[in-house]
Structures are given as structure tokens and as C-alpha cells.
Amino acid sequence: MLDSPETPGGCFGHFADIEADGFRTLTPGQQVDLTWEAPGFPQDGYDYRAVSIAPRSA
């Protein structure tokens, strides 16, 4: 689950949408740039779905 002010209650994010080379993973609390959509139906219980997840550099 990804959470932001624009996606109250969280956003479904699939690992395939993480923009990274090799094994795609995020750590709890990691900052990301998120592009999302509201598909009009719940995605695994979330009203929003990520279409692009770009981890921020430290």
C-alpha cells in the first residue's frame, strides 16, 4: 500500500510498476514519486492504483 495526501486510504501498487533495475522492492517508509489513477472500481480494496512508482534517491 502506498499512501499520499492525494490518495487517502492508500493506493494499490504492484511490484511490476516500480521503476528500478533488477529485483524491484521498496522498504517501509521509503519516499517515492507516484503516478496513480482512480480506475472507478476497488483494486484489492483500494480506490486508487499506481501506474508508476519511482523510488527517490537518498
Image (tube, rainbow, N blue to C red):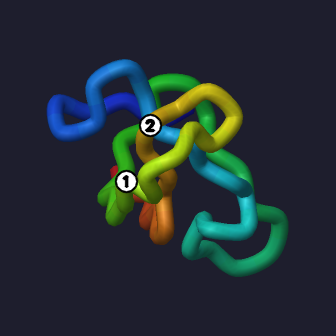
The image quarter in which residue 3 lies: top left
Q: Could you say where residue 32 lies in the image, as x and y percent from the top left? A: 37, 51
Q: Amino acid at mark 1?
A: Ala
Residue 38: which disc? 1
Q: Are marks 2 and 1 in contact (CB under 8 Å)?
A: yes
Q: Is residue 38 above or below residue 5?
A: below
How many labels sit on residues?
2
Residue at (44%, 37%) from the top-left corner?
47
| Cα distance in 3D space between marks 2 and 1 | 6 Å
Residue at (34%, 64%) from the top-left corner?
35
Q: Secondary structure at mark 2?
A: loop
Query: Crowding at label 1, few (<14), some or many (≥20) Cα neighbours within 10 Å?
Result: some
* Residue furthest out toward the left: 5
Q: Could you say where residue 19 lies in the image, as x and y percent from the top left? A: 56, 74
Residue 47: which disc? 2
In the image, 28 versus 49, the foreground residue is: 49
Q: Is residue 33 left or right of residue 42?
A: left
Q: Is residue 11 left or right of residue 27?
A: left
Q: Amino acid at mark 2?
A: Asp
* Residue furthest out toward the right: 23
* Residue furthest out toward the top: 9
In the image, 1 versus 55, the foreground residue is: 1
Q: Could you say where residue 51 lies in the image, as x and y percent from the top left? A: 49, 68
Residue at (43%, 66%) from the top-left corner?
54
Indicate which disc, 2 or 1, sits on the residue closer to the N terminus.
1
